[in-house]
Image (cartoon, rainbow, N blue to C red):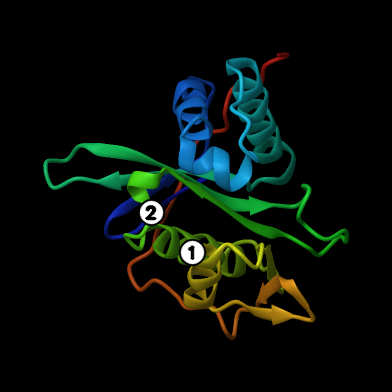
Amino acid sequence: MHILETPRLILRPPSHSDELLLHGLHSDPFVVNAIGDGVYPTIEQSKAALLQFINHWQHNRFGLWMVFVKDEGQAIKFAGYCGLMCSGPYVPEGPNNVGLVTCLHLAASGKGIAVEAGRAVVQFAFERLKLEKVTGFIRPTNTRSLRKNMKIGFSYVGDRMLFEVTPEKAVKIGNLRIVDCAEPEVTNQ
């Protein structure tokens, strides 16, 4: 497992102690309207989602990172998550399809955080995982995600909702730091 660090962000794998952070994110009205179709999650649903994130890491050695913004006073603030998923409702079927997923609080949107986190994740995918491509599914009405993915280097692939980026087209972060970290504890929840 790895922690990614950019000049202003820290991306770390999820842990069981993140359930309230994740529930707060998934309960943000901005997020509920964007991905939850207007339905607020229960705490049990957020716990289940977190367990899926952790299990994905355990089975694949990559997944969604919890994104934190560094503050000038050395404090960090939770912004959301960004990472790679090899399965899910929007990732096309296929052994080589790994999708970029991003979800941020409204307060973190529009500040370049999603672009910076996405670039770090995609760079990790190509440099460490040696993937040939990363895909992304974006609803045509989600203009923020469309702009973000274009800034990362994604381009349309036939379907107007499916995007793809390859190592040659990905925009890199010059100061990306990758740190190995311990595996999360395994639970039977």
Q: Is residue 132 left or right of residue 142?
A: right
**Mark 1 touching mark 2, by CB under 8 A?**
yes
Is residue 30 depicted above or below 4 in this figure? above
Q: Residue at x 57, y 84 (%)?
A: 169
**Residue 118 position in % (x across, y down):** 49, 62
Residue farthest along the bottom direction in this orientation: 168
Q: Residues within 10 Å of mark 2 (few under 14, many from 20)?
A: some
Q: Which residue is mark 1?
A: 144
Is residue 180 depicted above or below 25 in this figure? below
- Quadrant of the frame with the N terminus: top right
> Which quadrant of the structure image shows residue 92?
bottom right
**Residue 94 position in % (x across, y down):** 88, 61
Q: Which residue is mark 2?
A: 109
- Residue 181 vs residue 56, the one in the foreground: 56
> Which quadrant of the structure image shows residue 111?
bottom left
* Residue type for callout 1: Arg
Q: Residue at x 33, y 52 (%)?
A: 9
Q: CA distance from mark 1 to mark 2?
A: 9 Å
Residue 85 is at least partly visible in this image: yes
Q: Is residue 138 left or right of residue 96?
A: left
Residue 1 is at least partly visible in this image: no
- Residue 138 vs residue 75, the one in the foreground: 138
Q: Earlier in the sequence, mark 1 or mark 2?
A: 2
Q: Which mark, by number, is residue 152?
A: none
* Residue type for callout 2: Ser
Question: Count the marks: how many?
Answer: 2
> Which quadrant of the structure image shows residue 37?
top right
- Quadrant of the frame with the C terminus: top right
Q: Residue at x 63, y 48 (%)?
A: 62
**Residue 27 position in % (x across, y down):** 50, 29
Is residue 60 depicted above or below 183 in this figure? below
